[in-house]
Image (spheres, grey):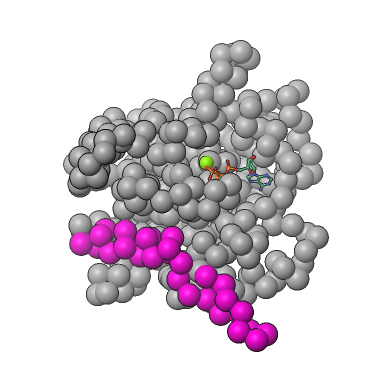
Amino acid sequence: MKYRHGGRRPHVIVVGNEKGGSGKSTTAMHLTVSLLKRGFRVGTIDLDARQGSFSRYVENRLAYIEATGMNLECPEHRRIYGSTRDIQEVAEQEEKQSLQTAWAALDDRDFIVIDTPGSDSSLSRLGHIMADTLVTPLNDSFLDMDMLGRVELDGDEYYLSPSVYSQMVWEQRQKRAMDRLPPMDWVVMRNRLSHINARNKKDIGQLLEQLSKRLRFRIAPGFGERVVFRELFPKGLTLLDLGDATGDVSMSLSHVAARQELRQLLDVLNLPGNVEAQPASSVDSVGVAAGATPMTQAAAAGADSSRAAVLEEAKAVSEA
Ligand SMILES: Nc1ncnc2c1ncn2[C@@H]1O[C@H](COP(=O)(O)OP(=O)(O)OP(=O)(O)O)[C@@H](O)[C@H]1O
Ligand SMILES: [Mg+2]
């Protein structure tokens, strides 16, 4: 399956981790709205259609817009169910076809954000092959770390070996290299960081640092533990809408800090189209000149800095 259209194709951000409840759908929605608010055209795909949290998030947003008449940005959304066919090859073919159809509907976008299920499936693997950027939210616990690298204790020393999920990511990276797709930039972001257990936070930080070199991912700071994430979902809102949605969930200092974390995540992701170069004050602005999205402007200027950051890795993967 080739994910290209004309000379340019959308940059695909996949949010994945086989560990359930790590914050994938929440992160997918926040990245989507961040990009929309910066004037990019964004398509979204829910590969966890059976649970459908990402789809529900988008539906809740549409319902909120309908109820309040507010002018909030929304992505063009597609929901893809896993095939129910018994024969594996037939099922995989059907899933490929569904993905291809969704891709064809969204391939004029600047970005496609894909949410994946918290378990292994052929559909999730197909989604991971598409990742130009793979974002893996990781809850700050040893149990969740185990999904990336098996944490074993030898006396007083922890050591790590690759887990099933990181092996799966490695395989999809190799498939991308064989398909001559750009290398995948894998970014692990820590989620639900707590100020209470500082020792745990430090231990996990050190292990993650070791693992990042071995598995070739980058580490993003991620989000603290914040109640607001649970409050926003029923209204389909994100942290970035709070100023607009006055009266519903009002802004607090914690929300301001959370927005800052989201901006930092975008900076670290280093996405094409100068996403990271947007000044903080323009995060909430929507207006762009007709027909000229930040992506096309950046493309015209030949600016695509994210590629350079992962070229070295591309070489390593294709040589593997
Ligand atoms: N930083 C955070 N602070 C507090 N709550 C959070 C945070 N991130 C996510 N949550 C909450 O954790 C729950 C799980 O998040 P989410 O649904 O995004 O995870 P998921 O990885 O998509 O789960 P699944 O694997 O089941 O699809 C949700 O109730 C969400 O609001
Ligand atoms: Mg989810």
How many marks do you count on the picture?
A: 0
For the point 74% across and 57% down, which residue is it? 194
Q: Could you tell me which residue is drawn at 57 percent across and 76 percent down?
A: 152
Horizontal relation, residue 64 to residue 123: left or right: right
| Location of residue 145 by image quarter | bottom right
Q: Nearer the viewer, residue 244 or 47?
A: 47
Q: Is residue 168 magenta?
A: yes
- What span is colored magenta in the figure? 150-178
Q: Nearer the viewer, residue 254 or 60?
A: 60
In this view, 22 is above or below 55? below
Q: Residue furthest front?
A: 86
- 36 on left or right of 80: right
Residue at 56% x, 80% y: name it.
159
- Measured along the vertical axis of the image, is residue 52 above or below residue 161? above
Residue 196: x and y in percent read 80, 60
Say if 153 sits above or below 216 in the image. Answer: below
Residue 271 seen in the figure: no
Compared across the picture, whether 43 is left or right of 180 comes to: right
Say if residue 83 shows up in the picture: yes
Q: Position of residue 268 (x, y in %)?
A: 53, 58
Task: Name the spot of residue 133 as percent of width and height, x first.
Answer: 41, 54
Q: Nearer the viewer, residue 153 or 278?
A: 153
Query: Which residue is the extreme one toward the bottom?
Result: 155
Taking the spot 53% from the left edge, 34% from the top edge, the residue there is 53
Assess whether residue 158 is covered by the magenta stretch.
Answer: yes
* Image location of residue 316, percent across then percent down: 31, 74
Q: Is residue 233 above or below residue 307?
A: above
